[in-house]
Image (cartoon, rainbow, N blue to C red):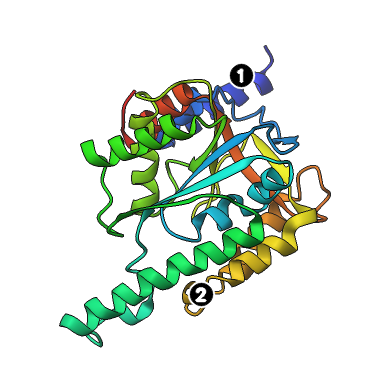
Amino acid sequence: MGNHGMNGCLIRRMVRRLLPARTRRFLNFINLSLDQVSPPELIPVPAARSVLVFAPHPDDEVVGCGGTLCLHSRSGAKVTVAYMTDGRLGSLRLQGDALVGHQRESFQGELVEARKAEAAAAGRLLGTGELVFLDFPEGELRRCRETVRRVADLLVASRPEVVYVPFPTDRHPDHVETARIFSAAVGEAPDGCQVYAYEVWSPLYPNCMVDISDVAEVKRQALLEFATQIADNDYVHSMLGLNAYRAAFHLKSRGYAEAFFRCSPREFRRLCWHLVGGAP
């Protein structure tokens, strides 16, 4: 080995040592080397008759994988979306002391109902089927016996061939907990499904991507249905911008793509354990 190769090895080892422990474990888990990184694989919409999506809040399913869900529906798949929380905190009006006591509770109740109606309208555009509202309080979602049981029951009842769930490090507490709950529940449910972890708040390290260019406008219209959410933040611009960025791989920056980390349930459990804790 020449000096150049030896120096390269030393630099790589130094870089790895400087990385946080969780990041090092993640790199080891997916067997990456820092000098040999392949682009994510461009895949067709996964073949499936039954698809199950776990969304921490109403709108996350559209943000993270709405285009792919639309393609699933168009291919004849039954798509079920399970919302983990009720979305009661999804408004800037709840910050500060403007609303207190009964007034605050009343507004939160109206917000929950509005977000459910928005989810239903978006689902009609995407062609999704059943919507399941688990109604755990937003901001209080935790992996516990009840949440794991409810998710495991859904897995048993729907027997999905494909499951969409947030990537474990998606930077919102409810998103992390959704991944941890699913990680525990999938060990109690029948195996055989393929897991596709999606991104919302934090770009993930994808190993595959789906071209959603043909349905990007449908996704845009579905996002616009969430009036309570885009009133405070232009999520349509941001999230389609992320999909446009993903088009840099394979699509020559033309069109839109959704990126995923594809793995087996067992691999997802290991990944979740390495990154945020959970059932190994």
Residue visible at 68% across and 34% down in the picture: 46
Amino acid type, mark 1 = Met
Looking at the figure, which quarter contains the C terminus?
A: top left
Residue visible at 23% across and 40% down in the picture: 146
Residue 133 in which image quadrant: bottom left
Q: Secondary structure at mark 2?
A: loop
Looking at the figure, which quarter contains the N terminus?
A: top right
Q: Secondary structure at mark 1?
A: helix
In the depicted structure, whether residue 189 falls above or below residue 122? above
Residue 240 in which image quadrant: bottom right
Residue marked by disc 1? 6
Residue 207 in the image: state x and y as whole percent. Answer: 63, 34
Residue 21 visible (yes or no): no
Residue 268 in the image: state x and y as whole percent. Answer: 46, 29
Most foreground residue, 39 or 184:
184
Residue 100 in which image quadrant: bottom left
